[in-house]
Image (cartoon, grey):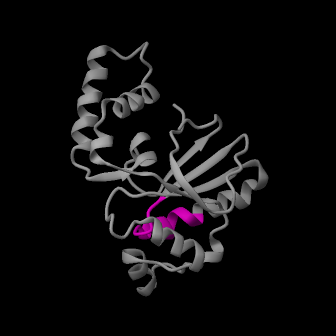
Amino acid sequence: MKLALNYTEVIKGELNLGSINLMMAFQVNCPGCFIHGFPVLKELQTYYGNKLSCIALSTAFEDFQINTEENAKLLVNTGELVGETLKAQEAGHLNWESSTLSVPVLIDEVINQSVLQKSEFIESIIINMLDRTTTSPLEQGNMRASLYNYFSQLPQCGKTFAANLMRGTPSFFLFTDPWKS
């Protein structure tokens, strides 16, 4: 499997991938991303130094009115938190400082349900996720149907989030091969 990375913009830093790369997908309205995800990312970046290229991807699979490109830019540029993440900070559950954000931040391309359900998109996931030499046509068909049904429940979603079948945030991807867009 190759990471299927589709982003619209790099809002902090430059995207300079190395031979070993780690991407963390997060949502701005995800307290767990800030309580657990970003500290782990920073710790790994510190431990491995220039041996590991780290990036963060702001995505959305829920709370679309909060998990926006605008709020991701506010986070990066001013450190401003929103939604449940802000409530968690106000309750003392996290201590966020934008200076702790030391990796390039990319914005996931958000796509609507009609794109999610296109046969080309679903087929690209199957090709990327399954070994077609060992997966029967029946299993492939079942996966197509499952993906179509799952995507029918989403009004929209981050394309990278959907294409890599992420189950939530934070999600981490360690990759060496160039990604496919």
Q: Residue 63 at x, y = what percent? A: 31, 65
Residue numbers of the magenta segment: 26-39
Residue at coordinates 35% horizontally, 56% vertically from top-left?
61
Q: Please tell me how many numbered marks the rendered image carries.
A: 0
Horizontally, is 57 left or right of 52 in the view?
left
Q: Residue 122 at x, y = what percent? A: 34, 32
Q: Residue 97 at x, y = what percent? A: 59, 79
Horizontally, is 149 left or right of 9 in the view?
left
* Residue lying at the far right of the rendered structure: 50
Horizontally, is 31 left or right of 140 in the view?
right
Let me know if residue 176 is in the magenta part.
no
Q: Residue 18 at x, y = what percent? A: 73, 44
Horizontally, is 45 left or right of 144 in the view?
right
Residue at coordinates 31% horizontally, 22% vertically from top-left?
140
The chief SS type of the magenta part is: helix
Residue 86 placement: quadrant? bottom left
Residue at coordinates 44% horizontally, 63% vertically from top-left?
27
